[in-house]
Image (cartoon, rainbow, N blue to C red):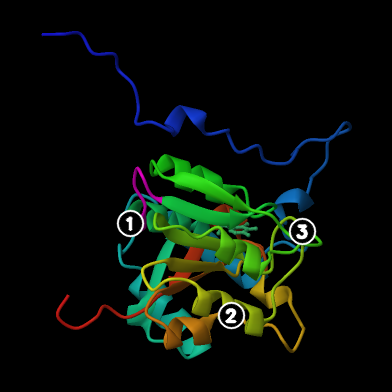
Amino acid sequence: MAKRKLAPRPGILDIEPYVPGKSKVDGGGPVTKLSSNENPFGASPKAVAAFKAAADQLSLYPEGSAAALRETIGAFYGLDPMQIVCGAGSDELLGLLAQAYLGPGDEAIYSRHGFLVYPIVIMASGATPVVAQETDLTADVDTILGCVTERTRVVFLANPNNPTGTYLPFEELKRLREGLPEDVVLVIDAAYAEYVLKDDYQPGIALVDATPNTVMTRTFSKIYGLASARVGWAYCRPRSPGC
Ligand SMILES: *Cc1c(COP(=O)(O)O)cnc(C)c1O
């Protein structure tokens, strides 16, 4: 038999490792990585107490479908728990979305200064990342739409974006969705939804409800100061009947 060289799928070795911000300073002391938007206030004392109480159960597998958490998130936001998926941080959910919708030959678009995890999950799925230039460090709907080809399957948009802190008003988000083909998934990464106080901003729940191809991701890492617990969730369309 001809000898084949062991190699991962194309694209894997092209991934540039994610480099987190520095977590040590000269002189020691606790460091809050603002480049990763760690919450300098820490977690709620109630969350800390719950975490300590869970220490007795470390040997048990968690309930895999995160039913209790999905019920609670659903009650808090008025959403159907069946349309919520929890993950080990929203990073895992971004990876799962890429795995589910992308493969070799496909393209996925993100904006020039978009969140660094997008190119990683796109390349890990074997697909090709396509970078849409920004205007004033802000995602540009027309430029993103101009990047769409027959191969486009996913658009990743952080709204608001990390690291630029800029955002698209809901009207622009709707215009983006309307301009995208139906077989393209729009992933609205609303990791910082809680931080926006502008009237023209919406995290994207209404767009998930109104369209068959939009997903919103959220995280407990930033606003709740729970980065170490790795808790993220996605709000998705219900499974269509007959599927
Ligand atoms: C921090 C961050 C995430 C991922 O957070 P998790 O800790 O994996 O939930 C996703 N998107 C953006 C834009 C972020 O800044």
Q: Residues within 10 Å of mark 2 (few under 14, many from 20)?
A: few
Single out the residue that lies furthest toward the right: 27
- In whole angstroms, how far apart are the C-alphas of marks 2 and 1? 25 Å
Report the quarter where the N terminus lies. top left
Q: Which residue is drawn at 31% across and 67% down?
A: 65
Q: Name the residue under label 2.
A: 175
- The number of numbered badges drawn on the structure is 3
Q: What residue type is labelled 2?
A: Arg
Q: Does the magenta stretch include residue 215?
A: no
Q: Magenta: predominant secondary structure element?
A: loop
Labels 3 & 2 near each other (Cβ < 8 A) = no
- Residue contact at pointers 3 and 1, CB within 8 angstroms: no
* 93 relative to 190 in the view: left or right: left
| Residue type for callout 1 | Ala
Mark 2 falls on what kind of element? helix
Residue 4 vertical placement versus 68 (above, below) = above
In the rendered view, does 158 fall on the left or right side of 123? right
Label 3 to label 1, Cα distance in Å? Answer: 28 Å
Which element type, helix, strand or loop, lies under badge 3?
loop
Residue 61 location, x and y as percent? Answer: 31, 55
Quadrant housing residue 44? bottom right
Q: Residue 17 carries which label?
A: none
Residue 58 vertical placement versus 184 (above, below): above
Would residue 224 be visible to someone looking at this image? no
Residue highlighted by disc 3: 164
Q: Give the range drawn in magenta.
A: 101-106
Q: Do the residues labelled 2 and 1 touch (CB within 8 Å)?
A: no
The residue sitting at 77% across, 84% down in the picture is: 198
Q: Where is residue 137 in the image (x, y as percent from the top left)?
A: 78, 59
Which three-letter amino acid code belongs to the residue tagged 3?
Thr
